[in-house]
Amino acid sequence: MSWSSKNMFYSLAACLILVFGIWAISPSPPETQRRDAEYGLAASNAAESVDWQVWSPAGLGEEWTPSTVTFGERADVPETLRMGWITPEQEYIESRQAENPTQAWVDEVVLPGMEAQEPVSIDGPNGTSDWELSTGFDDNDVPVSALVLEPSGDQSATTIVAGTASIPEMLTYIEALKTP
């Protein structure tokens, strides 16, 4: 009699009520919480590993959110520092630095089909330099821009700042670049 289907149903119902009760009182955050990327540590480690000046932003403010940071091989270029940020306007901006980059490395950021514009003179970490500006659209028809600084003076690495961010936000980012 104690092995009846009716008792098994009551047991299952009791277990489900208990599980639902535990789930109902468990705290859940109102939104997904994401941990910011540790860009300062990655930039410092990269600076110790390479012979060129590594640049990372300093003093951008709390409305700028670091989203990704990597240091390693990218498009057959062994030492690439890549940092991604979400801007105050909720757009994406990415910077990459590497010495002797391949065309495939450049094409990952400066998309084929982007149109070259007039160079832009920007106060960056090595003083005022002319950055090559390209604009275009990505595969989803979203406007993108890329600013490229070829090696010059003390800097032997190529630097690219690109993304969906506006040109003024890109200028703010470049002006915040410093050697860690």
Image: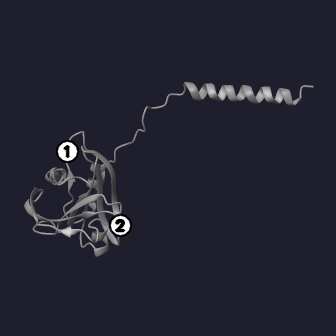
Which residue is farthest front?
141
The answer to whether one can see residue 47 in this image is no
Identify the image quadrant of the N terminus.
top right
Residue at screen point 73% across, 25% down = 14
Say the numbered circle drawn on residue 60: 1
Viewer-nearest residue: 168 or 153: 168
Horizontal side, residue 8 vs residue 147: left or right? right
Percent x, y for residue 26? 54, 28
**Rendered position, 9 above or below 168:** above
User: Which amino acid type corresponds to the residue marked 2 in the rendered image?
Assistant: Glu
- Mark 2 against mark 1, which lies toward the viewer? 1
Residue holding disc 2: 73
Instruction: Work out whether residue 99 or residue 163 is closer to the camera in this orientation and state it.
Output: 163
Give, as a three-letter code, the residue at label 1.
Leu
Element on which disc 1 rests: loop
- Considering only vertical position in the picture, is 74 above or below 180? below
Above or below residue 98? Residue 15 is above
**Res 81 → quadrant:** bottom left
Residue 54, by quadrant, is bottom left
Q: Quadrant of residue 157?
A: bottom left
Q: CA distance from mark 2 to mark 1?
A: 27 Å
Looking at the picture, tell me which residue is in the foreground, 14 or 35: 14
Q: Is residue 74 visible?
A: yes
* Residue at the image position 20 percent from the left and 56 percent from the top: 55
Q: Sort mark 2 into few (<14), some (14-19) or many (20+) by Cα contacts within 10 Å.
A: few
Q: Along the horizontal axis of the image, is 68 left or right of 167?
A: right
